[in-house]
Amino acid sequence: MHELVNIPRERAIAVGVGSRAYSRDESLEHLDELAFLAETAGAEVICKIYQDRDRPDGATAVGRGKLEEIKEMIEEDKIVLAIFDDELTPAQMRNLSRELNIKVLDRTGLILDIFASRARTSEARLQVELAQLQYLLPRLSRMWTHLSKQFGGIGSKGPGETQIETDRRMVRDKIALLKEKLSNVAVQKAEQRKGRDSMQRFALVGYTNAGKSTLMNAVTGAEVLVENKLFATLDTTVRVVELSGNDHTTHKTVLLSDTVGFIRKLPTQLVASFRGTLAETLEADVLLHVVDVSHEHFRDQIRAVTETLEAIGAGEKPVIMVFNKIDALPDLDLVHALQADYTNSVGISAQRGINISTLQEMMLEMGDDRHETLHLLMPYSAMKELAQIYRIGTVLDRKDLDDGIELTARITTDEARHFRAWSVETV
């Protein structure tokens, strides 16, 4: 496989180019985020440079004047890596590499590199490799044109063109194989999730580094990796959680999942290849949208997450807004204002455990349209059906009586129709 560049603390310059899609302030904040991404990957960002333009230059993204300025900075600061905030076309990548004479990456390539270094499970590795190859395929163009110019002629294919076709065919074959493998994994995971249909599902979503994994640990004790880095978590973690109300009389067993965080300009290749991982989000009954409310641009991050949820088909899910890191705020006025804007919301500190019980209370109160609670009186002759309820549902209460078994069970609405013949008003 053609691997993307690995960055061993290389001295880097981060380059941003304005566009009509974002304001200058937004573009500068994106550039700061790019620098954080580079540091997460292991680079040392020596300087950042930004250019206001209506649209990127077709040849070099930045234009001739700014390109000369970048060259001077590269020479003066001994920079060996240039990272651009937006995805570069193959032509731009080729021209910049030739003009700057150093390694050139764009935001997509950098994120893919981080994902490749963070993937732990075989599924995550397959997903990252697929995204890398999909990113690489269009960039194979013209890699061998120097050969075709020397040897190619009218009516014949030069060795350069033959090499391009060979590489493209190998990459396409590998992409097809990876998609098949991921499809098989998706089928296996879907079968595994069937066994969990009896419980309500909650999924943690949010911008990368918002504190999702810290919250997962606070609620479940799952010991998910927590780092002050972007994309510290790639693989899905699912845990059973026993929720308890403040009155300690209400209880509910649910599933809580944590997976990869979102980011602005998330590469489309990653969204596509990680659909298997994102299935936990798609199949969740309720989403917990975790927001780092101490971040200067948290509203932009909320918008980025919302747009990504809509892109993967989860935009209509019920949501609890979880405003995290309130301990980093000077006061709670902001949190109170946000709670007025968002009906289902709570301010917490996952790290310090503040208001975790309030969040759990909200989770208890969120309805579950996919399940219902049945009160049954089952004869002893229905032991096969009783065993099925234990297998596919959650038995909340049971009493063995002379004339049968009184049962309170939580089960999916689709399955409940098979047992309504034994339904009673009260148990």
Image (tube, rainbow, N blue to C red):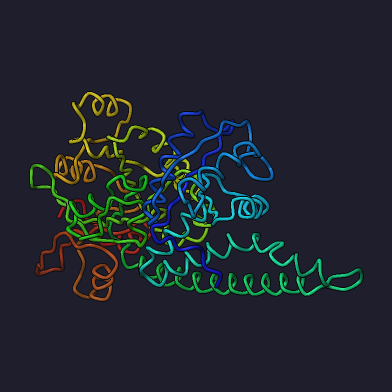
**Residue pictured at 32% horizontal, 47% vertical:** 209
Q: Residue visible at 23% across and 75% down?
A: 383
Quarter of the picture containing the N terminus is bottom right
Q: Is residue 358 left or right of residue 154?
A: left
Residue 221, picture quadrant = bottom left
Residue closest to the eye, 112 or 82 = 82
Residue farthest front in this picture: 76
- Residue 335 sits above or below residue 150 on the image: above
Q: Position of residue 247 (x, y in %)?
A: 8, 42
Q: Number of marks in the image?
A: 0
Q: Is residue 105 left or right of residue 217?
A: right
Q: Residue at x 35, y 35 (%)?
A: 298
Q: Nearer the viewer, residue 383 or 101?
A: 101
- Quadrant position of residue 174: bottom right
- On the image, the x and y values in percent for residue 145 come to 75, 65
| Residue 281 in the image, given as x and y percentages of width and height | 39, 53
Q: Quadrant of residue 419?
A: bottom left
Q: Position of residue 152 (x, y in %)?
A: 84, 70
103 lies left or right of 187: right
Closer to us: 325 or 8: 8
Dividing the image into 4 quarters, which one contains the C terminus? bottom left
